[in-house]
Amino acid sequence: MDRFTISSIMETLTWIGFFAAIILSYYFYLRYRNKERMALIEKGVDVSGIFKPREITFKFPWLRLALFLVGIGTGILFTYLFIAFISPNLTGPRHQFDQMIFIFSLLIFGGVSIIIGNYLEGKRNKGNG
């Protein structure tokens, strides 16, 4: 019984539950979609557009990804400069403060870069279309 502890059993059950939730979600999605299509067919609606393969017009957002990575890099640089120059003057539990600054600067600079990327993409798409 030493090999199987309660924590290992709980971890196994957690993973089984996680994958079961994903599989059941997909099953109920397909079930609902089928019922909806059957209801449309019973009402006499033309469903040829539903079953027609769609044209894929996906373009990878290189500008947004690049700006996000630049924002993350700027956050790391800001964190390094802040910890190197300002943090030594502070007193208290320094290690936790440094971790908080690192996480918050990554989130803030990454979020700002995503906002800028969306703004620039909108301007670019508005100019093209």
Image: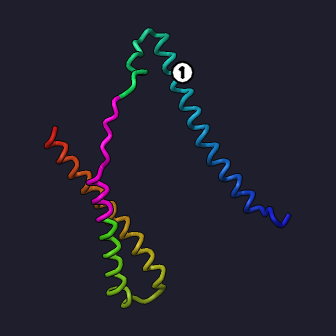
Instruction: Identify the image's colour scheme: rainbow, by chain, secondary structure or one colour.
Output: rainbow
In this view, the residue in front, 62 or 75, is 62
109 with respect to 15 (left or right): left
- Image quadrant where residue 80 sits: bottom left
From the image, which quarter does the N terminus lie in? bottom right
> In the image, what residue occupies the spot 37% across and 83% down?
83
> In the image, what residue occupies the spot 50% across and 16% down?
39
Identify residue for label 1. 35
From the image, which quarter does the C terminus lie in? top left
25 with respect to 46 (left or right): right
Outermost top residue: 44
7 with respect to 104 (left or right): right
In this view, the residue in front, 94 or 76, is 76
- Image quadrant where residue 111 sits: bottom left
Q: Does the magenta stretch include residue 78?
A: no
**How many numbered callouts?**
1
